[in-house]
Image (tube, rainbow, N blue to C red):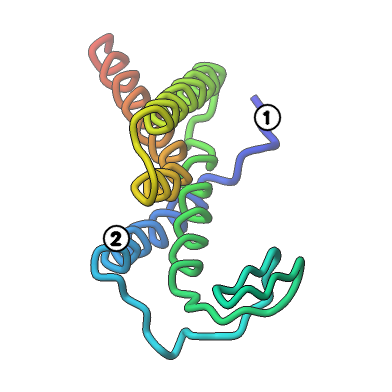
Amino acid sequence: MKLNYLFPNRYKKIGLIILIPSLIFGLITVIYDLEPEILDLNVPAIFVNDIIGEQELVGLTDNNILNEICGALLIISLILVAFSKEKQEDELIAKIRLESLVWATYLNYGILLFAMLFVYELSFLWVMIFNMFTILLFFIIRFNWQVIKLNKSLSYEE
C-alpha cells in the first residue's frame, strides 16, 4: 500500500534522536524556569501587547526564545516519530494508525474539556501549553502499543 502522507521509515530515528533530548531539556526548562540571557532577542511578533500599554498588530518584541526553540524541536520530532512509515507498512498498520489517531484525538479533547470545566486561570494556561503536545504523544504511545500487541499475536501464531 502506497501512503504518500507518511515520511520514510528512517525519519523515525531522526525524530527519536531529536525527541529525547528536546523532551528532557524542555521539561528542565519549564521546571527550573530557565531563560539564558544570550537568548533574549528582539523578535518579530503578531499581536504585540506590551505591559506599558502599547499595542500593535505586527511589530517587534523582546523575548527569550528558549521556550520557542524547545517547543518547535518537540513538535517537529513528535511529527517525525508519529508519521514515519513502519518497516512493514500494510493495510492493518494503516488501520491501527487511523484508530490510534482517532483514540488520541478523543483522549486529548476529553482532557481539554475536563480542564475547561475544572481548571482555571494560570493553571489552565499550563494545561493548554502541555495539551499542544499530548495528542501526538498519545498517538505515538497507542500506535506503538498496538503494533507491539500485533507482533506478539503474530509470533504466537507461528
- The reply, left or right, for residue 95 in relation to residue 35 is right
**In the current view of this chain or complex, which residue is farthest to the right?**
57
Provide the residue designation for mark 1: 2
- Closer-to-camera residue (48/83): 48
- The reply, left or right, for residue 89 in relation to residue 138 is right
Quick one: SS at disc 2?
Answer: helix
Q: Relative to 38, say whether 81 is above or below.
A: above
> Residue 24's mark?
none
Instruction: Name the image quarter holding the C terminus.
Output: top left
Query: Between disc 1 and disc 2, whose residue precedes?
Result: 1
**In the current view of this chain or complex, which residue is farthest to the top?**
157
**In the current view of this chain or complex, which residue is farthest to the front?**
53
Provide the residue designation for mark 2: 27
Q: Residue at x 47, y 37 (%)?
A: 87
Callout 1 crowding tier (Cα within 10 Å): few <14, some 14–19, many ≥20: few
Q: Which amino acid does label 2 sit on?
A: Leu
Instruction: Name the image quarter holding the N terminus.
Output: top right
Callout 2 crowding tier (Cα within 10 Å): few <14, some 14–19, many ≥20: few
- Closer-to-camera residue (40/98): 40
Q: Nearer the viewer, mark 1 or mark 2?
A: 2
Quick one: SS at disc 1?
Answer: loop
Residue 99 lies, in percent from the top left, at 49, 18
Q: Looking at the rendering, which quadrant does residue 34 occupy?
A: bottom left
- Closer-to-camera residue (119/7): 119
Q: What residue type is labelled 1?
A: Lys
Residue 53 lies, in percent from the top left, at 62, 73
Q: Residue at x 55, y 73 (%)?
A: 51
Q: How far apart are marks 1 and 2 (CA)?
A: 37 Å
Residue 143 lies, in percent from the top left, at 40, 28
Q: Which residue is drawn at 67% across and 70% down?
A: 45
Residue 40 lies, in percent from the top left, at 49, 85
